[in-house]
Amino acid sequence: MSKKILVSLIAAMALLFVINRVEVMSGEHDKKNVKVSDSSTKKTTTATNVTKPVTKTKENSKETDFLNKVDLSLYELILVNERHAFSDEQLPEETGIIDSNYQVHADLVEPYNEMKKAAEEDGINLRVVSTYRSVSYQQQVYDQSIIDNKNAGMSDEEAKKETAEYVAEPGKSEHHTGLAIDLVDQPWLDAGKGLIPEFYDTKAGKWIDEHCADYGFIIRFPKGKESVTKINYEPWHIRFVGVENAKFIMANHLTLEEFVELVEKTQKEKN
Protein backbone atom coordinates (compact mmCIF):
# COMPACT_ATOMS: atom_id res chain seq x y z
CA MET A 1 0.00 0.00 0.00
CA SER A 2 1.39 3.38 -0.93
CA LYS A 3 2.20 5.94 1.72
CA LYS A 4 -0.37 8.41 0.33
CA ILE A 5 -3.22 5.89 0.54
CA LEU A 6 -2.24 4.97 4.10
CA VAL A 7 -2.33 8.61 5.24
CA SER A 8 -5.76 9.08 3.66
CA LEU A 9 -7.12 5.97 5.37
CA ILE A 10 -5.85 7.10 8.81
CA ALA A 11 -7.42 10.55 8.30
CA ALA A 12 -10.78 9.01 7.38
CA MET A 13 -10.76 6.77 10.44
CA ALA A 14 -9.98 9.73 12.69
CA LEU A 15 -12.88 11.71 11.19
CA LEU A 16 -15.30 8.82 11.80
CA PHE A 17 -14.15 8.59 15.44
CA VAL A 18 -14.79 12.30 16.02
CA ILE A 19 -18.28 12.13 14.45
CA ASN A 20 -19.21 9.09 16.52
CA ARG A 21 -18.01 10.77 19.74
CA VAL A 22 -20.06 13.88 19.01
CA GLU A 23 -23.21 11.78 18.47
CA VAL A 24 -22.65 9.89 21.75
CA MET A 25 -22.18 13.11 23.70
CA SER A 26 -25.24 14.62 22.05
CA GLY A 27 -27.33 11.59 23.02
CA GLU A 28 -26.18 11.81 26.62
CA HIS A 29 -27.05 15.51 26.68
CA ASP A 30 -30.56 14.79 25.38
CA LYS A 31 -31.07 12.14 28.06
CA LYS A 32 -30.06 14.65 30.71
CA ASN A 33 -32.52 17.17 29.28
CA VAL A 34 -35.30 14.60 29.37
CA LYS A 35 -34.56 13.79 32.99
CA VAL A 36 -34.53 17.45 33.97
CA SER A 37 -37.77 18.05 32.10
CA ASP A 38 -39.41 15.02 33.75
CA SER A 39 -38.25 16.18 37.15
CA SER A 40 -39.55 19.68 36.51
CA THR A 41 -42.90 18.34 35.36
CA LYS A 42 -43.26 16.17 38.44
CA LYS A 43 -42.49 19.10 40.71
CA THR A 44 -44.97 21.33 38.91
CA THR A 45 -47.66 18.68 39.03
CA THR A 46 -47.06 18.09 42.72
CA ALA A 47 -47.22 21.82 43.48
CA THR A 48 -50.42 22.21 41.48
CA ASN A 49 -52.17 19.41 43.34
CA VAL A 50 -51.45 20.87 46.78
CA THR A 51 -54.54 22.59 48.21
CA LYS A 52 -54.25 24.67 51.32
CA PRO A 53 -57.06 24.11 53.80
CA VAL A 54 -59.53 27.00 54.18
CA THR A 55 -59.61 28.26 57.74
CA LYS A 56 -61.58 31.02 59.43
CA THR A 57 -59.56 33.97 60.63
CA LYS A 58 -59.74 34.96 64.28
CA GLU A 59 -61.40 38.20 63.23
CA ASN A 60 -64.19 36.43 61.33
CA SER A 61 -64.70 33.99 64.18
CA LYS A 62 -64.92 36.84 66.70
CA GLU A 63 -67.44 38.65 64.49
CA THR A 64 -69.60 35.55 64.15
CA ASP A 65 -69.51 34.94 67.90
CA PHE A 66 -70.67 38.50 68.51
CA LEU A 67 -73.52 38.31 66.00
CA ASN A 68 -74.73 35.02 67.49
CA LYS A 69 -75.04 36.69 70.89
CA VAL A 70 -77.09 39.68 69.68
CA ASP A 71 -80.63 39.63 71.09
CA LEU A 72 -82.94 41.18 68.51
CA SER A 73 -85.86 40.99 70.93
CA LEU A 74 -84.40 43.83 73.00
CA TYR A 75 -86.34 47.06 72.71
CA GLU A 76 -83.19 49.01 71.87
CA LEU A 77 -82.94 47.05 68.59
CA ILE A 78 -86.53 47.55 67.49
CA LEU A 79 -86.66 48.30 63.77
CA VAL A 80 -89.01 51.05 62.64
CA ASN A 81 -89.15 52.11 59.00
CA GLU A 82 -91.50 52.17 56.02
CA ARG A 83 -91.99 48.38 56.28
CA HIS A 84 -92.10 48.12 60.07
CA ALA A 85 -94.70 50.38 61.63
CA PHE A 86 -94.85 51.39 65.28
CA SER A 87 -97.80 52.20 67.51
CA ASP A 88 -97.85 54.21 70.72
CA GLU A 89 -98.90 51.07 72.56
CA GLN A 90 -95.38 49.69 72.07
CA LEU A 91 -93.76 52.54 73.98
CA PRO A 92 -92.35 51.31 77.32
CA GLU A 93 -93.30 53.06 80.52
CA GLU A 94 -89.64 53.63 81.40
CA THR A 95 -89.06 57.18 80.14
CA GLY A 96 -86.69 59.98 81.10
CA ILE A 97 -85.87 63.59 80.34
CA ILE A 98 -82.76 65.07 78.67
CA ASP A 99 -81.84 68.73 78.06
CA SER A 100 -84.47 69.89 80.54
CA ASN A 101 -87.66 68.93 78.71
CA TYR A 102 -87.11 66.32 76.00
CA GLN A 103 -88.68 62.93 76.64
CA VAL A 104 -86.73 59.78 75.73
CA HIS A 105 -86.55 56.14 76.70
CA ALA A 106 -85.00 55.82 80.15
CA ASP A 107 -81.99 53.87 78.84
CA LEU A 108 -80.84 56.93 76.86
CA VAL A 109 -80.60 59.41 79.72
CA GLU A 110 -77.24 58.41 81.19
CA PRO A 111 -75.48 57.66 77.84
CA TYR A 112 -76.67 60.96 76.38
CA ASN A 113 -75.56 62.98 79.40
CA GLU A 114 -72.14 61.30 79.27
CA MET A 115 -71.84 62.07 75.56
CA LYS A 116 -72.86 65.69 76.08
CA LYS A 117 -70.27 66.08 78.84
CA ALA A 118 -67.53 64.59 76.67
CA ALA A 119 -68.48 66.96 73.84
CA GLU A 120 -68.31 69.94 76.20
CA GLU A 121 -64.78 68.92 77.18
CA ASP A 122 -63.93 69.15 73.47
CA GLY A 123 -65.52 72.60 73.20
CA ILE A 124 -68.84 71.50 71.68
CA ASN A 125 -72.20 72.53 73.10
CA LEU A 126 -74.68 69.89 71.93
CA ARG A 127 -78.36 70.77 71.74
CA VAL A 128 -81.37 68.49 71.27
CA VAL A 129 -83.91 69.52 68.66
CA SER A 130 -86.34 66.60 68.80
CA THR A 131 -86.79 63.28 70.58
CA TYR A 132 -89.94 61.30 71.30
CA ARG A 133 -92.97 62.02 69.11
CA SER A 134 -96.36 60.40 69.36
CA VAL A 135 -97.93 59.10 66.16
CA SER A 136 -100.40 61.97 66.22
CA TYR A 137 -97.63 64.54 66.62
CA GLN A 138 -95.69 62.93 63.77
CA GLN A 139 -98.78 63.47 61.63
CA GLN A 140 -98.57 67.17 62.41
CA VAL A 141 -94.86 67.26 61.53
CA TYR A 142 -95.50 65.40 58.29
CA ASP A 143 -98.39 67.65 57.25
CA GLN A 144 -96.49 70.81 58.15
CA SER A 145 -93.54 69.74 56.01
CA ILE A 146 -95.82 69.37 53.00
CA ILE A 147 -97.31 72.81 53.67
CA ASP A 148 -93.85 74.38 53.97
CA ASN A 149 -92.74 72.80 50.70
CA LYS A 150 -95.85 74.05 48.90
CA ASN A 151 -95.27 77.53 50.29
CA ALA A 152 -91.78 77.31 48.81
CA GLY A 153 -93.36 76.96 45.36
CA MET A 154 -93.62 73.18 44.97
CA SER A 155 -96.62 71.41 43.50
CA ASP A 156 -98.63 69.03 45.69
CA GLU A 157 -96.79 66.05 44.24
CA GLU A 158 -93.37 67.68 44.58
CA ALA A 159 -94.11 68.75 48.15
CA LYS A 160 -95.11 65.23 49.19
CA LYS A 161 -92.08 63.70 47.47
CA GLU A 162 -89.71 66.13 49.17
CA THR A 163 -91.30 65.49 52.56
CA ALA A 164 -91.03 61.71 52.10
CA GLU A 165 -87.26 62.03 51.62
CA TYR A 166 -86.71 63.57 55.06
CA VAL A 167 -89.81 62.96 57.18
CA ALA A 168 -91.15 59.50 57.97
CA GLU A 169 -94.84 58.83 57.65
CA PRO A 170 -96.81 58.75 60.91
CA GLY A 171 -96.37 55.34 62.51
CA LYS A 172 -93.10 54.78 60.65
CA SER A 173 -90.82 57.18 62.49
CA GLU A 174 -88.09 56.14 64.91
CA HIS A 175 -89.05 59.10 67.07
CA HIS A 176 -92.09 57.10 68.22
CA THR A 177 -89.75 54.74 70.08
CA GLY A 178 -88.07 57.33 72.28
CA LEU A 179 -84.74 55.91 71.06
CA ALA A 180 -84.00 58.62 68.49
CA ILE A 181 -82.57 62.12 68.95
CA ASP A 182 -82.18 64.97 66.47
CA LEU A 183 -78.99 66.61 67.68
CA VAL A 184 -77.06 69.72 66.62
CA ASP A 185 -75.07 72.34 68.57
CA GLN A 186 -75.77 75.80 69.96
CA PRO A 187 -73.88 77.81 67.28
CA TRP A 188 -75.88 76.02 64.59
CA LEU A 189 -79.13 76.97 66.29
CA ASP A 190 -77.93 80.54 66.91
CA ALA A 191 -77.25 80.86 63.18
CA GLY A 192 -80.87 79.93 62.50
CA LYS A 193 -79.94 76.85 60.50
CA GLY A 194 -82.18 73.83 60.26
CA LEU A 195 -81.73 70.09 59.93
CA ILE A 196 -79.74 69.91 56.71
CA PRO A 197 -76.87 67.62 55.56
CA GLU A 198 -74.36 70.49 55.76
CA PHE A 199 -74.44 70.12 59.54
CA TYR A 200 -71.87 67.33 59.13
CA ASP A 201 -69.30 69.90 57.95
CA THR A 202 -69.31 71.55 61.37
CA LYS A 203 -67.03 70.59 64.24
CA ALA A 204 -70.05 69.26 66.12
CA GLY A 205 -71.29 67.22 63.15
CA LYS A 206 -67.94 65.48 62.76
CA TRP A 207 -67.64 64.94 66.51
CA ILE A 208 -71.02 63.23 66.71
CA ASP A 209 -70.17 60.98 63.76
CA GLU A 210 -66.85 59.98 65.30
CA HIS A 211 -67.87 59.53 68.94
CA CYS A 212 -71.58 58.69 69.15
CA ALA A 213 -70.96 54.91 69.05
CA ASP A 214 -68.91 55.17 72.25
CA TYR A 215 -72.17 55.99 74.02
CA GLY A 216 -74.42 53.50 72.23
CA PHE A 217 -75.68 55.68 69.37
CA ILE A 218 -75.45 55.35 65.58
CA ILE A 219 -75.99 57.73 62.69
CA ARG A 220 -79.30 56.18 61.75
CA PHE A 221 -79.47 57.41 58.16
CA PRO A 222 -75.88 57.40 56.86
CA LYS A 223 -74.70 58.89 53.61
CA GLY A 224 -74.72 56.49 50.68
CA LYS A 225 -77.31 54.17 52.24
CA GLU A 226 -80.43 56.00 51.07
CA SER A 227 -81.51 53.01 48.97
CA VAL A 228 -81.59 50.91 52.14
CA THR A 229 -83.12 53.32 54.65
CA LYS A 230 -85.35 55.16 52.14
CA ILE A 231 -84.41 58.34 54.02
CA ASN A 232 -81.85 60.89 52.88
CA TYR A 233 -78.60 61.42 54.75
CA GLU A 234 -79.24 62.88 58.22
CA PRO A 235 -76.02 63.55 60.18
CA TRP A 236 -78.09 65.00 63.04
CA HIS A 237 -80.33 61.96 63.63
CA ILE A 238 -78.82 59.49 66.09
CA ARG A 239 -80.39 56.30 67.39
CA PHE A 240 -79.64 54.37 70.57
CA VAL A 241 -78.85 50.65 70.06
CA GLY A 242 -76.41 49.93 72.90
CA VAL A 243 -72.65 50.40 72.95
CA GLU A 244 -71.48 47.04 71.52
CA ASN A 245 -74.08 47.08 68.75
CA ALA A 246 -73.33 50.72 67.92
CA LYS A 247 -69.60 50.14 67.65
CA PHE A 248 -70.12 47.15 65.36
CA ILE A 249 -72.61 48.99 63.15
CA MET A 250 -70.52 52.14 62.79
CA ALA A 251 -67.22 50.29 62.31
CA ASN A 252 -68.74 48.22 59.51
CA HIS A 253 -70.64 51.12 57.91
CA LEU A 254 -74.00 49.42 58.30
CA THR A 255 -77.54 50.65 58.65
CA LEU A 256 -79.79 49.22 61.33
CA GLU A 257 -81.66 47.36 58.58
CA GLU A 258 -78.43 45.73 57.38
CA PHE A 259 -77.34 44.89 60.92
CA VAL A 260 -80.63 43.18 61.78
CA GLU A 261 -80.50 41.22 58.51
CA LEU A 262 -76.90 40.15 59.17
CA VAL A 263 -77.73 38.99 62.69
CA GLU A 264 -80.74 37.01 61.47
CA LYS A 265 -78.69 35.36 58.72
CA THR A 266 -75.80 34.48 61.05
CA GLN A 267 -78.05 33.01 63.72
CA LYS A 268 -80.05 31.06 61.14
CA GLU A 269 -76.88 29.50 59.75
CA LYS A 270 -75.86 28.47 63.26
CA ASN A 271 -79.14 26.67 63.80
Image (tube, rainbow, N blue to C red):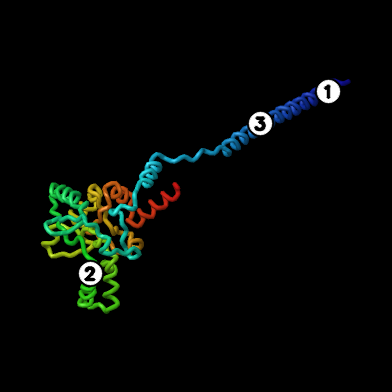
Q: Position of residue 57 (x, y in %)?
A: 42, 40
User: Outermost residue, right direction?
Assistant: 1
Q: Is residue 265 above or below residue 132?
A: above
Mark 2 vs mark 1, foreground winner is 2
Q: Earlier in the sequence, mark 3 or mark 2?
A: 3
Q: Quadrant of residue 197?
A: bottom left
What residue sits right under mark 1 in the picture? 4
Q: Is residue 6 above or below residue 37?
A: above
What residue sits right under mark 3 in the picture? 35
What residue sits right under mark 2 in the picture? 136
Residue occupying the point 26% across, 75% down = 159
Residue occupying the point 25% across, 64% down = 88
Amino acid type, label 1: Lys
Packing grade of label 1 (10 A; few <14, some 14-19, many >=20) is few
Measured in 3D between alpha carbons, the distance from the residue under mark 2 to the one under mark 1, in whole angstroms, is 131 Å
Measured in 3D between alpha carbons, the distance from the residue under mark 3 to the one under mark 2, in whole angstroms, is 88 Å
Answer with left or right where residue 83 lies relative to residue 111. Answer: right
Mark 2 in CB contact with mark 1 (< 8 angstroms): no
Amino acid type, label 2: Ser
